[in-house]
Amino acid sequence: MSSFPTEGAALKKIVEKSKSREIAFGYNPGTDEDDHYFAAHLKKTPEVLGKLARNEGLGAKIAFGTFTTKGNLVSLRCSKVVPMLAKLFKRLLRQNKIGLNVQILDQDGNLLDADIEDLPAEDLPAEDQTEDWSAGEDAAEGDEDEDEEEARAGDSAADDGAIAAAEAAVPDADIAPDSAEDLRRMQALVARVKAVQPRLAAAPPAMAGTLAGAMKGALTALRAGDYGRSEQTVSQIEAILAKLPAASGAEGATVADAPAAQPASDPRLPKLREAAQGLLAQIAALPGALAEPMEAQLETVLVRIEAAEAEAALGMLRQVQEVLRPALEAKAKWDKAFALVDPQVTAALSAAAGGGQDLRVKWNFATGLAAEGQYDRALVSLGAVATLLRQGPAATADAPPAGVVAFQRSRVLWLGARSKMMDEARKLGDRIAASGADDEDAAEIAAAGREIVAQVERIDERLQTVLDDLTNSPEGRARETLKRQAAAVVSEYEAMLGAAPFTMIDQNPFEPVSVAARARVALTAISRSLA
């Protein structure tokens, strides 16, 4: 099988092939000029090679498509591009002693980028170089250069046959194993998957759906070449199945074949499952920002229940209940207040005949906080709405103070930006922790992931609070003071973004995120509104 990344003699050979046909490629520029990742293949699709470049390369961005070479110009027709692709790819070619100019095209053939110069004579492809690049090719056209690429990777002929057999067991594999070690892992996984099939088929109906979903995830990871994740999932499935009594008639097994020390099922498990499902129903009434962490924990609870780990499931259920109870109480208070005030606001805005902007802004502000699950702050803001309503039609018909709309827009912009930043930071932290799950230093790696999240959380809620106050402020000295406070917080955040980890976070090798860039865009817009 072919090996990746494509470099050295293999890259020279495949560039030569591109003179007569389109070659699919995937490219990851990495984090600096020394860790490019380039994969090209005569049979695989650009999408598969792009996925390979994303998984195996160190950078967060990728390009993929096809390329051809004519004379001293290589043309990359891209489905997805990265900035400065022509310059980066030309540098990659030079590192592999290939002197060619580069142009980047979109799928319609439009020129996007180019790096073209008068090449020195020694850089131009010569016939003797071409012969050297192609040395060792088999005469048969259908060979696809597999022998030389395998020799370069150190794979043996025996490995080749075994890999083919493993691929036959998982025929939809996106990424073939490119080393003997990966081959052995893939073979072992295929054997384990086959071994548990009879026990999966005999699983109790209440567990069958959960186990089938887990096995589907394991197979997806296996086909994608993510052997670590697949091994972990298969191990969990095996652990759950090991706790079940052997079913009569499955591959000749009988109840007598089960271990004599098999413990009786914990009578708490059905009640725990029912409690978890009941909590999920209650959580569904909460906004996503509140609901998602609790839903994730309850999914873990259900896995613990399926594994018959009653004590662990009970402890996690209690944690969810401790968070859920005050959230539901706060929501109930808000719902009651909303039911009282909403008809009054509707009537006041109707009577204002297009006016009532101050009331509208305050009402939208309060309901927006509630939609985010910030019920305590929403109730405080609802007090300002009630004050306007008590003052009568004259107050509700007044136009808002000058500049309030700009502050309201800034607040909404920052609220959305910060929420997405935090989501992406947590996603990155989880990915970092998962990457070291099988490492002997797993605890330290997980701590590094948590530290990234903690650093992003330093961009706290102070700016949101000041913008909230500005939204409700009249013109005058108080507003100017608040504007200065907001500008100071913006400057502080911008200084944070100029230091680690924010200077590196968007280009991390673990998970594509947009944390620092998103923050910079939002802060620039807010600065303009404060000027």
Image (spheres, rainbow, N blue to C red):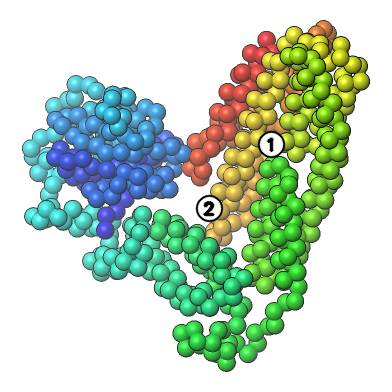
From the viewer's perspective, is residue 440 above or below residue 451?
below
Q: Residue furthest bottom?
A: 256
Counting from the top left corner in percent of width and height, residue 185 is at 41, 66
Counting from the top left corner in percent of width and height, residue 19 is at 15, 38
Q: Is residue 480 visible?
A: no
From the viewer's perspective, is residue 230 above or below residue 396?
below
Quarter of the figure that contains the N terminus: bottom left
Nearer the observer, 263 or 146: 263
User: Which amino acid, mark 2?
Assistant: Ser
Q: Are marks 1 and 2 in contact (CB under 8 Å)?
A: no
Indicate which disc residue 175 carries: none
Nearer the observer, 57 or 268: 268
Question: Callout 1: 10 Å neighbours few (<14), some, many (20+)?
Answer: some
Question: Callout 2: 10 Å neighbours few (<14), some, many (20+)?
Answer: some
Judging by the rendered image, the residue that carries numbered circle 2 is: 435
User: Looking at the rendering, which quadrant does residue 163 occupy?
Assistant: bottom left
Quarter of the figure that contains the C terminus: top right
User: Which amino acid, mark 1?
Assistant: Glu
Side of 351 relative to 90 (left or right) = right
Counting from the top left corner in percent of width and height, residue 258 is at 58, 87
- Measured in 3D between alpha carbons, the distance from the residue under mark 1 to the one under mark 2, in whole angstroms, is 22 Å
Residue at position x 89%, y 16% in the image: 392
Residue at position x 50%, y 40% in the image: 512
Judging by the rendered image, the residue that carries numbered circle 1 is: 457
Counting from the top left corner in percent of width and height, residue 492 is at 69, 23
User: Looking at the rendering, which quadrant does residue 306 occupy?
Assistant: bottom right
Residue at position x 24%, y 23% in the image: 116
Q: Residue furthest right?
A: 390
Q: Secondary structure at mark 1?
A: loop
Q: Secondary structure at mark 2?
A: helix
